[in-house]
């Protein structure tokens, strides 16, 4: 019994004089005293040699020693982990900080804002309307009555709850709503999303963004339309870009035209984007049809006007030389980061 007491005291002194200041020394202590072949297990095995009348006293001593060793190990563990945490949390203010990624507007928004800014300098104000429209504002008032063949060009999404409701196929519906108010003269641009039931590809999508323009006043001519669009092209693409107008057909304008610019990718030499012609169509335009004016309660003998419309994606593709329309709606960070401004 005396020998057991002597060993316990010896081990206590060793433990109290131990220096534990790292994970390695902590693990070394655990193995030496608490491991499967450690001193604690070894000294517990000596109970079998203690006389029967002294086993109770010996058991109490061994149990107290066990509690002592485990408590010491637990305290040492907290100390080592605390010191390590302090080391990791120390802040060196002289080190450079972590850079924060710079964000930017979406390329469609960048071009949208530039287009709006150009026309605002010409006195155009912004008008907006609902994306879910009725047949009158989207078709009939624009000289596309029921069964008109031009309706087949729109590939419309209709709302199943009401056959008179649809997702607008152009922002011309906003022009009708503004003309119906009768506040003349009228000079507006109508930006917004439009929807068409088309197969998604590199050149087409089921939704896209448009900006349409409208000017209604007395004595408005096609020359006014041309000068307005000449100014837009020069401001948008630069003074070296060439422009041409081609006769076209739209039910809501007469006469009607499409406007082309020299290809920005090949400089007019001819490439796959411009189909080897050197020209790219960017918008449709024309003088507002007298019937459209009458549908909106405007005297077509007193007032005339012009209208134009363009897809923002088309302008953006030309501006940044992007060849796949789908990139604008896929939210691919690798693509969008190219437009981050430093």
Image (tube, grey):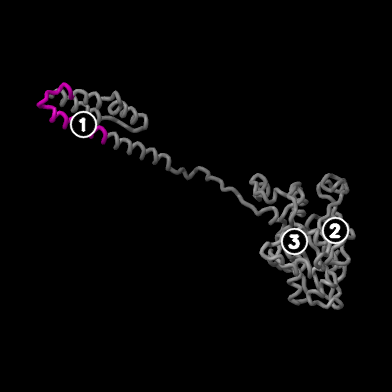
Question: x, y percentage for residue 44?
Answer: 21, 26
Query: In the shown orientation, is residue 169 left or right of residue 26?
Result: right
Residue 56 covered by magenta stretch:
yes
Q: Secondary structure at mark 1?
A: helix
Whichever of labels 2 and 1 marks the residue nearer the N terminus, that label is 1
Picture residue at 75% right of the left edge, 61% below the top: 169
Towards the viewer: 267 or 36: 36
Which residue is found at the position 86% from the left and 51% from the top? 279
Q: Is residue 305 magenta?
A: no
Q: Name which residue lies at 88% across and 57% down.
A: 244
Name the residue carrying label 1: 65
Marks 2 and 1, how far apart in space? 96 Å
Looking at the picture, does residue 180 appear above or below residue 148? below
Residue under label 2: 259
Dot 3 or dot 1: first in sequence order is 1
For label 3, the residue is: 169
Image quadrant where residue 285 sits: bottom right
Name of the residue lying farthest toward the top = 49
Which secondary structure lies at badge 2?
strand
Residue 66 vertical placement versus 212 (above, below): above
- From the viewer's side, name the closer residue of 223 and 182: 182
Q: Is residue 142 above or below residue 157?
A: below
Give coordinates of residue 71: x percent, y percent.
Answer: 26, 36
Q: Position of residue 34 (x, y in %)?
A: 29, 28
* Residues in magenta, as a range: 47-71
**Which corner quadrant of the image does residue 174 belong to?**
bottom right
Q: Is residue 126 visible?
A: no
């Amino acid at each position: 019994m005396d020998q057991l007491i002597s060993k316990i005291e010896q081990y206590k002194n060793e433990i109290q004089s131990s220096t534990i200041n790292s994970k390695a020394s902590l693990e070394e202590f655990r193995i030496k005293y608490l491991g499967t072949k450690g001193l604690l297990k070894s000294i517990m095995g000596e109970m079998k040699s203690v006389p029967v009348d002294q086993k109770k006293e010996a058991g109490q001593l061994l149990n107290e020693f066990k509690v002592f060793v485990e408590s010491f190990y637990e305290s040492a563990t907290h100390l080592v982990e605390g010191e390590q945490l302090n080391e990791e949390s120390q802040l060196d203010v002289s080190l450079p900080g972590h850079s924060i990624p710079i964000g930017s507007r979406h390329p469609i928004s960048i071009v949208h804002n530039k287009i709006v800014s150009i026309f605002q300098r010409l006195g155009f104000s912004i008008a907006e309307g609902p994306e879910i429209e009725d047949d009158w504002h989207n078709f009939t008032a624009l000289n596309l009555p029921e069964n008109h063949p031009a309706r087949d060009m729109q590939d419309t999404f209709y709302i199943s709850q009401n056959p008179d409701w649809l997702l607008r196929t152009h922002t011309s519906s906003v022009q009708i709503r503004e003309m119906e108010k009768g506040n003349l003269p009228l000079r507006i641009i109508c930006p917004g999303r439009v929807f068409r039931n088309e197969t998604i590809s590199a050149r087409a999508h089921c939704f896209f963004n448009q900006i349409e323009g409208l000017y209604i006043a007395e004595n408005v001519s096609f020359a006014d339309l041309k000068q307005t669009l000449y100014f837009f092209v020069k401001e948008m693409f630069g003074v070296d870009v060439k422009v041409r107008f081609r006769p076209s057909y739209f039910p809501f304008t007469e006469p009607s035209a499409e406007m082309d610019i020299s290809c920005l990718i090949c400089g007019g030499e001819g490439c796959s984007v411009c189909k080897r012609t050197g020209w790219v169509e960017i918008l449709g335009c024309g003088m507002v049809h007298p019937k459209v004016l009458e549908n909106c309660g405007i005297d077509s003998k007193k007032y005339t006007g012009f209208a134009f419309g363009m897809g923002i994606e088309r302008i953006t593709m030309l501006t940044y030389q992007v060849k796949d329309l789908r990139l604008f709606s896929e939210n691919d960070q690798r693509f969008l980061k190219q437009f981050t401004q430093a």
